[in-house]
Image (cartoon, rainbow, N blue to C red):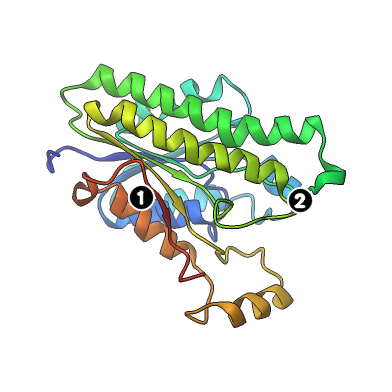
Amino acid sequence: MNQSQPQNALVTGVSRKAGIGAAIAREFARHGVNVFITYFRPYDHESGLAGDPAEPAQLLDTLRGMGVQADGLEADLADPHTPARLMEAAESALGPVNILVNNAAYSMRDGIDALTADLLDRTYAVNLRGMALLCAEFVRRFRRHQPTSDFGRIINLTSGQSLGPMPGELAYVATKGAVEAFTLSLSAELAPLGITVNAVDPGITDTGWISPPLRTTWEASAPMGRLGTPEDAARLVRFLASLEAGWITGQVIHSRGGL
């Protein structure tokens, strides 16, 4: 990797300052990486986690104050035209993008009795199709910019569904299992281009959604006596996006504090 070459990252799912996506964006900025974020406020309201509608703009101000270029766009990843539009916007704002972090996710409680075609389709459209199409658009543009871009990184956020059951989240775990399978095969396909592809399972992460009773239960069973923070996940993602991680690809890294 040419360390004088600007590093530009596209990070999806950055609606809330308390979330993993925002922590990743801040971690990149601390290390001099320019950042383009995406967010979709209607999903925040649907999930019940919506906060101040100005949070994405506030985060962008914070990132710029850290000395990097930063921009963003509200976009629905369920729309198959969104990936090309996002990459075009990111390139217009920052220049060629060589780091893609697929953090955005759609997740609704279901269970077998609540599982419907509509819920499966909505979950698939964001978690798998949107992610895969963003990867495809990233690769098309990466090829276009070679040899000025001499390395690429794709990091997909996943969950712990391969380590044990997650009842009540069937649509979500089905799509995240597919993300892990996609990551492995894509890594082999892109290795000759110098693009690494990995997935990160951050474990139970405190982003504001955990009720006090659940927190008490989970902390009691946690080997380290605490739950994960967005910053824990962000540091790992930043490492996988770095020069030092160039020999790591095709991996699902379970960063769960021993859980």
Which residue, given by chain and number where applicable, does mark 1 sit on?
A: 64
96 or 228: nearer the eye? 228
Height in image: 91 above or below 209? Answer: above
Height in image: 141 above or below 259? Answer: above
Residue 208 in the figure: left or right of residue 38: right
Q: Position of residue 44 (x, y in %)?
A: 68, 48
Give me the disc on residue 80: none
| Label 2 crowd (10 A; few <14 / some 14-19 / many >=20) | some
Residue drawn at 29 percent across, 54 percent down: 239
- Alpha carbon separation for disc pair 1 and 2: 36 Å
For label 1, the SS is helix
Q: Position of residue 191 (x, y in %)?
A: 26, 31
Amino acid at the residue labelled 2: Arg
Amino acid at the residue labelled 1: Arg
Circles 1, 2 touching at the beta carbon (< 8 Å): no
- Residue 253 visible in this rendered orientation of the protein: yes
Residue drawn at 36 percent across, 57 percent down: 236
Indicate which label's residue lies in the foreground, 1 or 2: 2
256 or 138: nearer the eye? 256
| Label 1 crowd (10 A; few <14 / some 14-19 / many >=20) | some
For label 2, the SS is loop
Give me the disc on residue 109: 2
Q: How many marks?
A: 2
